[in-house]
Image (cartoon, helix red, strand yellow):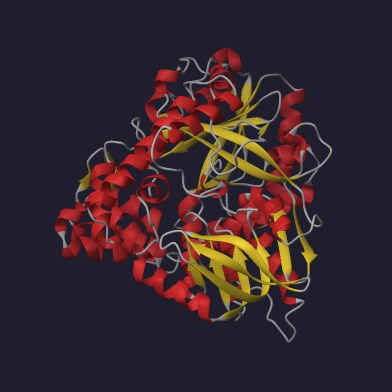
C-alpha cells in the first residue's frame, strides 16, 4: 500500500462502480471491506485521515468479553465477544493478539470472593473456545507473590483470570491490507464531502483527495457508513435524521515505565464508575480508562489534568509506591461511539451495536466494541446485500486469517534462524513477529538490501529503521504522524512523545513518499505542534480549557490539523 498503489486506487475508484463503498477506516470499516470483498463483491474503502486515526488507535488495546458487562447482565454481548476473542487468538490473528493475565484484588472476605468468583466462573464458562487458562483463586500471600507492588492492606486475596491484548492501530491497518490483498480498493487521505444521490437513493460519494487536492466521485450500489462517532454527521449528508444516534464517551489512558510497578500480571480494579486496568505493554504499563461525556471536536480529543489525576488517584489506592505525574511517559485520549440512550452516565450505555438503513442505498453501523468488530462488519454487509439482488455468499471471515497469520507459528518456531539471517538478536525478531507476523519477511528483505536499516532508530531504540521505511512503502503511511503514532507507538512510548526520533523517521520515509526538504520540514513542524498542543492541553483542568488550548496552539502556527473524518 505504497504511494503508487494509492494513486492507482484513486484512479480505479473514479472510473468504476462498486458493489459497496465503505466510509471510515477504523476497525469496523476495514472489517466491512474485508467481509464484503471475501464474499466476491467489488469494494471501495475510503478514510479521511489514516487507518485507525480515530477510536481504533486509542482503545485500551484489549480483546475481551468485558467483565463489567456481566454485571450489567449483558450475557449475549459477553458470549459473543469471548467467541471472537478465541477466533482471534487461535485462527485469525495469533501474531497480533496474545493472552494476558489479570489480577482482581478482593477487599472484602467471603461475600466478595463468592460474588466476583461466580462472575469470573461464568466468564470462563461463556468462553466456549477454551483457548485461555481458567481463572484461579489466590490468597493474599499468593497474590502478593505475583503483585508485590500492591499494598498488603489493599487486598485480602485475589482472583486471577485471562484475557487478551492487541496493538489496535496495527490490527486495523492489517485488516485494510488484507482487504486490499483480496482485491478491495482502499485509500487513506480520501475524505467524503458529500453523498451522491439519485432521487432519494444514495449512489456513491464525492471524495476529496487530501494529498492531491482534487475531487472524485465514487459510485456504488450500496454505501456503508462505519464512521463511529461521526455517524450522525454522515446521516445528515443523506438528508435524513432517521437511523442511529451516537453519543461520544471519552476514554483516557496513561503509560508509565514497567519498572515503576512491581507486577508480574495485569491488574483490574473497581472504581465508583466502572473499572480501571493496568495492562502490560512491552517496557510500559498502560493505565486506563476514564469514561466521560464528550461534546467538543471529535477529530482530536484531548486529556485534561482532571483525567490524569483521576487515573493516578485510583491506581495509587493500591500501589505501595505511588505514581506521580513525573512517571508518565505517554498519554492518549479516544472517543467511544455509544448508541445514544437515556442514561445520564456514558458508563451505563450499552456497547452493543446496531445496523440501520436510513435511506435507500445507505447502511449505518454503529456502537459495539473493538473485540466484536467482525460481527458488526458481517451484520452490516448482510443488510447491504439485501438490495444487491442475486445470491451473495455468506460471510467467511470467521475462518479468514489476517495478513501475517499464515505461517506465523512456523516462523515463530524458527525465529533463531531468522535472527541469524537478519543479523539481529532473537528478542528483536520475537518483537517483529508479534507486530508483522509472517509479513516480517518483507521487512527483513529491506534489511538484507540495506544493512543500515537493521539499526535502531535514534530516540526510539525499540524500533528498527526499516520499520519506518516499511510503514511508508507497504503500510500506507502518508505522513510523519502516521508512522510515529500508529504504525509504531513511539508517540506514547517515548517520554518526549517521539520528538527525538522524528527527524530520522522523516528522513527515512521522505524518498519513499517523494518529499523534498520543504516537505520534510513541514512534516516535522506539524508533528512538533501536535505534541506541544497535546502537552499543553494535559495541563488544563477541564475538557473545555484543554480543547481551547489545543486549538490555540494550531491557530498560532501557519498550519492546520489534518481534516476531520466527514464534513457535514
- Point 30% across, 60% down: residue: 513
The outermost residue toward the top is: 153
100 in relation to 383, above or below: above
Expressed as whole percent of the image width and height from the top left, the position of residue 308 reads: 53, 23
554 in relation to 311, above or below: below
- Point 43% across, 28% down: residue: 535
Residue 283 appears in view: no
The outermost residue toward the left is: 451
The outermost residue toward the bottom is: 390
**Count of numbered tags:** 0
Question: Nearest the camera: 265 or 260?
Answer: 260
Expressed as whole percent of the image width and height from the top left, the position of residue 449 reads: 17, 65
Left or right? Give the position of 9 relative to 205. Answer: left
**Which quarter of the rendering shows the N terminus?**
bottom left
- Point 72% across, 85% down: residue: 391
Using the rendered view, name the quadrant where residue 373 is placed. Answer: bottom right
Expressed as whole percent of the image width and height from the top left, the position of residue 331 reads: 47, 32
Left or right? Give the position of 399 relative to 381. Answer: left
Question: Nearest the camera: 564 or 309?
Answer: 564
Residue 366 appears in view: yes
183 in relation to 141, above or below: below
Question: Nearest the camera: 420 or 206?
Answer: 206
Expressed as whole percent of the image width and height from the top left, the position of residue 551 reads: 50, 33
The outermost residue toward the right is: 342
Question: Nearest the camera: 75 or 544?
Answer: 544
- Point 28% across, 51% down: residue: 519
Amino acid at each position: 500500500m505504497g504511494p503508487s498503489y494509492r494513486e492507482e486506487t484513486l484512479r480505479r475508484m473514479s472510473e468504476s462502480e462498486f458493489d459497496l463503498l465503505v466510509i471510515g477506516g477504523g476497525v469496523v470499516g476495514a472489517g466491512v471491506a474485508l467481509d464484503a470483498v471475501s464474499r466476491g463483491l467489488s469494494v471501495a474503502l475510503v478514510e479521511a485521515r489514516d487507518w485507525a486515526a480515530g477510536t481504533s488507535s486509542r482503545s485500551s488495546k484489549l480483546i475481551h468479553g468485558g467483565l463489567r458487562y456481566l454485571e450489567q447482565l449483558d450475557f449475549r454481548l459477553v458470549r459473543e465477544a469471548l467467541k471472537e476473542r478465541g477466533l482471534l487468538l487461535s485462527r485469525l490473528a495469533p501474531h497480533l493478539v496474545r493472552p494476558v493475565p489479570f489480577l482482581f484484588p478482593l477487599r472484602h472476605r467471603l461475600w466478595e470472593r463468592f460474588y466476583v468468583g461466580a462472575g469470573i466462573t461464568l466468564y470462563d464458562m461463556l468462553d466456549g473456545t477454551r483457548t485461555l487458562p481458567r481463572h484461579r483463586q489466590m490468597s493474599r500471600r499468593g497474590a502478593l507473590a505475583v503483585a508485590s507492588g500492591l499494598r498488603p492492606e489493599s487486598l485480602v486475596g485475589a482472583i486471577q483470570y485471562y484475557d487478551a491484548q492487541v496493538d489496535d492501530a496495527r490490527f486495523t491497518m492489517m485488516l485494510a491490507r488484507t482487504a486490499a490483498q483480496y482485491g478491495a480498493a482502499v485509500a487513506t487521505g480520501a475524505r467524503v464531502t458529500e453523498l451522491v444521490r439519485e432521487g432519494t437513493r444514495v449512489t456513491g460519494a464525492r471524495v476529496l483527495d487530501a494529498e492531491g487536492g482534487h475531487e472524485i466521485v465514487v459510485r456504488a450500489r450500496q454505501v456503508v457508513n462505519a464512521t463511529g462517532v461521526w455517524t450522525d454527521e454522515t446521516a445528515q449528508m443523506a438528508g435524513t435524521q432517521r437511523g442511529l444516534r451516537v453519543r461520544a464517551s471519552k476514554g483516557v489512558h496513561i503509560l508509565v515505565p514497567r519498572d515503576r510497578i512491581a507486577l508480574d500480571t495485569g491488574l483490574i480494579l473497581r472504581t465508583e464508575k466502572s473499572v480501571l486496568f493496568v495492562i502490560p505493554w512491552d517496557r510500559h504499563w498502560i493505565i486506563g480508562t476514564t469514561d466521560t461525556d464528550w461534546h467538543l471536536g471529535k477529530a482530536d480529543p484531548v486529556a485534561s489534568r482532571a483525567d490524569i489525576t483521576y487515573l493516578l488517584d485510583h491506581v495509587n489506592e493500591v500501589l505501595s509506591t505511588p505514581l506521580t505525574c513525573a512517571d508518565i511517559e505517554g498519554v492518549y485520549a479516544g472517543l467511544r461511539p455509544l448508541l445514544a440512550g437515556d442514561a445520564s452516565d456514558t458508563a451505563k450505555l450499552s456497547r452493543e451495536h446496531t445496523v440501520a438503513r436510513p435511506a435507500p442505498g445507505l447502511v449505518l453501523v454503529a456502537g459495539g466494541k473493538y473485540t466484536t468488530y467482525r460481527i458488526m462488519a458481517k451484520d452490516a454487509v448482510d443488510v447491504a446485500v439485501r438490495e444487491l439482488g442475486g445470491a451473495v455468499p455468506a460471510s467467511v471471515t470467521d475462518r479468514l486469517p489476517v495478513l501475517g497469520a499464515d505461517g506465523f507459528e512456523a516462523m515463530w518456531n524458527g525465529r533463531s534462524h531468522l535472527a541469524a539471517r537478519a543479523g539481529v538478536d532473537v528478542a528483536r525478531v520475537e518483537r517483529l513477529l508479534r507486530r508483522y507476523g509472517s509479513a516480517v519477511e518483507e521487512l527483513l528483505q529491506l534489511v538484507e538490501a540495506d544493512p543500515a536499516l537493521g539499526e535502531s532508530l535514534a530516540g526510539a531504540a525499540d524500533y528498527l529503521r526499516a520499520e519506518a521505511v516499511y510503514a511508508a512503502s507497504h503500510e500506507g503511511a502518508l505522513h510523519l504522524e502516521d508512522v510515529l503514532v500508529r504504525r509504531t507507538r513511539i508517540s506514547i512510548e517515548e517520554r518526549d512523545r517521539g520528538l527525538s526520533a522524528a527527524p530520522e523517521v522523516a528522513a527515512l520515509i521522505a524518498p519513499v513518499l517523494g518529499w523534498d526538504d520543504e516537505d520534510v520540514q513541514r512534516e516535522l513542524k506539524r508533528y512538533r505542534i501536535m505534541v506541544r498542543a497535546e502537552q499543553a492541553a494535559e495541563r488544563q483542568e477541564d475538557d473545555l480549557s484543554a480543547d481551547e488550548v489545543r486549538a490555540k496552539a494550531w491557530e498560532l502556527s501557519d498550519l492546520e490539523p489534518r481534516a476531520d473524518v466527514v464534513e457535514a
